[in-house]
Amino acid sequence: MLDSLSDRLQGAFKRLGTSGKITEADLDVALREVRIALLEADVNFKVVRDFIARVREKGVGQEVMQSITPGQQVIGIVNQALIEVLGGNSEALLSPDSGPTKILVVGAKGSGKTTLCGRLALKYKDDGRTPLLVSTDFERVAASEQLKVLGEQIDVPVWVEEKEAPAAEVAKRAMKEAERIGANVIVVDTRGAVALEDELADSLAALADEVDPTEVLIVVDAMTGQEAVTLAKEFDEEIEGTGIVVTKVDSDTRGGAMLSVREVTGLPIKLITTGERLEALEEFHPDRMASRILGMGDVVTLVEKAKEAIGEQDMKSVARRMRSGQFNLEDFLAQMQQMRQMGPLTGLLDMLPGGQQLAKQVAGVELDESFITHSEAIVLSMTPEERRNPDILNGSRRRRVALGSGTTPAEVNRLLNQFKEAKKMMQAMTSGKAGGGLGRMFGL
Ligand code: GDP
C-alpha cells in the first residue's frame, strides 16, 4: 500500500544533510522531491501546493534539535503536514443520543458501497446493535442479490423490493420494517454513479429527505484517483455528506485520492477499508496513516500501548535512568514484566521506525514468557546490592544465585549478558543513535 509514495519520500529526506541547520537550499531540494512524489501519487495539485508551502514555512531556518539529523527533523515537519492534510484528528461515526442510527452510503459504481453496507452492519452488530440493510439500487440487479447474500452471511435482515420504485419510497417502507423488527441501525445502499447526473442527484436528495440520515457516507475508491475526489465533491454539494470512506486502501494505490479528498471536500475521512473480507474496516486515524506513508512504522500505536502498560511517569523515570547509565537489573526486570503486558518484543520492534533492523541487532535477546519467569527468579535471588551493581557478581555469587532460583549458572550468565546487551541498546535508543530514538518518540 502506498509503497512508491513512501519510497520516494524517504529518498527525498536522505538528501538532507546529517548535521547543522536546515538550510533553505537543502530544504528546496528535498521539497522538490516531495512535490514530485505527491504529484506522481496523483494528489490534487492545489493540495500539493499548500502542502509544500506549509512545510517550507515550518522548516526554513529551524535549528536542528540535538540528537537528530536535519533529515529526521524535516520528516517530522512533513509528518505533521501529512496529518493536517489527512484531517488532523480522527472523527468517529455519528450516533444519535436517541432514535436509530441511519446511514446512507453513496458513491461511484464499483467503489465498494454494497460491501461497505455489509461491513457497517457487521460492525454495529458486533457492538450489540440491531441493524437492517436496505437496498434501493434497481439498476444493478446483482446489487440487491449481493446485499442479500451479505445479510445472510452476517445474519442481518435485508430489505429488498422486487418491483422497481423510487428510492425514497423503498426507504419509507424499510423504515417501517425497521420499527416493526426493532432495528436501531439502518444502512441504506444506493445506486452507483458514473457521473452525478440530475436524475440520480434528485433521487438521492429525495431519499435523504425521507430517511433524515444521521450519516451520509461518500465512498471514494482509492484506486481511481482524482475523478473519485471530484465526484465526492459533487455528491457533497448535492446531498451534504457527513464523512468519507476510502475503500481499497490495501490495493496498490498511489494514495492521491486519500491525500486530496479531505482538503477538496472539507469532509473528514471517517473509515477506510483494507481488503475484501467484511472485517477489513478500520477507523481512520490521520496520524497513523501519515506514519505509514512515511514508512515510520505505526509509532502511535506503539506509544499508546506503551503508555497504557507502563504509565507515562514510570517511562520517563526509566528513560532517565537509562540515559544516565544507572539502569540496573531491578529496572531490567520491571521492564521485562511491563513488556510482557505489551505483547512480544519482536512485535513491538516491528512498529518502531527502523525497528526491523534493531530486531536483527538484538536477535540474541529472546524475551519470551519462560525467559521472563526465569529471569524474575534469578533477579529475586540476588541481594539488593547485586541487583544495583551486577558487576560484583563473581563466580561464587552466580552459583549461589543459580541455586537459590532453581536455575543453572549458565542461565544466570546468559541473563547477565542479555542485561548488558539490553542496557547498551537502550542507551543507544534513548540517545537517538538507533532507529528514531525512543526518548524523542516518547517526548522525553
Ligand atoms: P459497489 O458497486 O459500489 O456496490 O461496489 P461493491 O461493494 O460491489 O465492490 C466492488 C468490488 O470491490 C468488489 O469486488 C469488492 O469485493 C471490491 N472491494 C470493495 N472494497 C474493497 C477493499 O477494501 N479492498 C479490495 N481489495 N477490494 C474491495
Image (cartoon, rainbow, N blue to C red):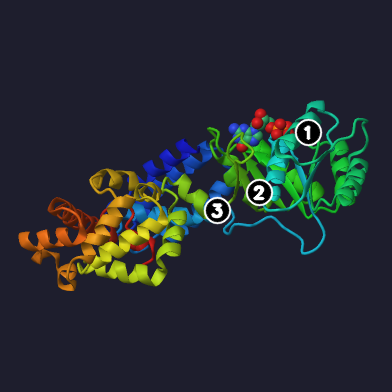
Amino acid carrying mark 3 in the image: Pro
Residue denoted by label 3? 286
Q: Circle 1 — which element?
A: helix
- Residue at (50% x, 52% y) in the render: 288
Residue displayed at 51% across by 42% down: 38
Q: Quadrant of residue 34?
A: top left
Q: Quadrant of residue 401?
A: bottom left
Front-most of 153 and 164? 153
Q: Is residue 123 left or right of residue 442?
A: right
Name the spot of residue 304 as percent of width and height, x first.
Answer: 46, 60
Which residue is depicted at the point 10% across and 64% down? 391
Category of crowding for the residue at label 2, using alpha-carbon neighbours closer than 10 angstroms: few (below 14), some (14–19), many (at least 20): some
Q: Which mark is residue 380?
A: none
Q: Earlier in the sequence, mark 2 or mark 3?
A: 2
**Residue 385, image x and y in percent?**
15, 72
Which residue is at 55% across, 56% downward? 84
- The kind of residue tagged 1 is Lys
Q: Which mark is residue 264?
A: 2
Q: CA distance from mark 1 to mark 2?
A: 35 Å
Numbered disc 3: secondary structure: helix
Which dot, 2 or 3, sits closer to the camera? Answer: 3
Q: Which mark is residue 148?
A: 1
Q: For marks 1 and 3, give the one nearer the viewer.
A: 1
Q: Please provide percent x and percent y for residue 180.
A: 90, 50
Q: Quadrant of the C terminus?
A: bottom left
